[in-house]
Amino acid sequence: MSSLSSALEQRSAGRCELCDTAANLVPFTVAPKEGHSADEQVAVCPTCLNALAEPTAHAAHWQCLTGAIWSETPAVQALSYKTLSALTGEDWAAEALESVEFPENVVSWATGGTGGETVIHKDAFGNELAAGDAVLLTQNLNVKGANFIAPKGTLVKKIRLVADNAEQIEGKINGDTIVILTKFVKKQG
Ligand SMILES: [Zn+2]
């Protein structure tokens, strides 16, 4: 395992930049950047490093990101954004993402773009969807896990776009945040 560059050592001051734990830190490169400098890396503790390998299996640990997203370091913001976005179905993660206005370069970094390509979400009729839009369900939707069927015509307010998948959005139905396929929604207004 490589050790921290002096720039990262200085920036982190010995504390994990994600969970703020004092530990033996290692550099983590925030893809798709290649880690050429400390600006493209985050100093993380062994716990975070392990959890980063499979974010959804460590959802509880990632509560720490509700603090890290306020970092002034773009790499830390991008990694926090990326990790929180991976936690689909976690209400608190969606809310944390909504609570911060991320700079555009951070969002495109976190969503895997090198700046060029963007994922465009469209409803069943080809209308472009944006975060915060309201949509109607065009089919009955069987909500797995929550054990109910959301009927066709259900209004879902304030949707969120799934960053790396043009066919998925997230929205709240009956208080549960669920993933909805864009081909089963119609944009309102
Ligand atoms: Zn950590």
Image (cartoon, rainbow, N blue to C red):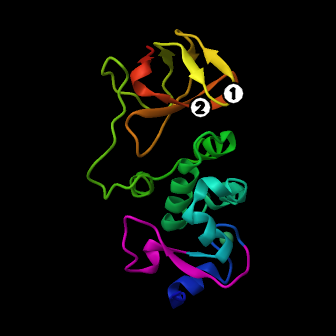
Compute the Cα span from label 2 to label 1.
9 Å
The answer to whether residue 91 of the structure is visible from this angle is yes
User: What residue is pinned by disc 1?
Assistant: 146
Q: Earlier in the sequence, mark 2 or mark 1?
A: 1
Q: Are marks 2 and 1 in contact (CB under 8 Å)?
A: yes
Using the rendered view, name the quadrant where residue 69 is placed. bottom right
Ligand 1 sits in which quadrant?
A: bottom right
User: What residue is pinned by disc 2?
Assistant: 178
Between 147 and 41, the one nearer to me in the picture: 147
The answer to whether 97 is drawn above or below residue 43 in the figure is above
User: Which mark identifies residue 112?
Assistant: none
Q: Is residue 39 left or right of residue 14?
A: left
Q: Residue at x 49, y 14 (%)?
A: 136
Q: Between label 2 and label 1, give the one nearer the viewer.
A: 1
Few, some or many C-alpha atoms within 10 Å of disc 2 (few <14, some 14-19, many ≥20)? many
The three-letter code of the residue at mark 2 reads Ile
Between 57 and 156, the one nearer to me in the picture: 57
The answer to whether residue 156 of the structure is visible from this angle is no
Between 53 and 105, the one nearer to me in the picture: 53
Q: Residue at x 51, y 86 (%)?
A: 7
Stretch of the chain drawn in magenta: 21-42
Q: Residue at x 62, y 39 (%)?
A: 89
Residue 159 picture location, percent across and down: 52, 29
Using the rendered view, name the quadrant where residue 158 is placed. top right
Residue 128 picture location, percent across and down: 34, 27
Few, some or many C-alpha atoms within 10 Å of disc 1 (few <14, some 14-19, many ≥20)? few
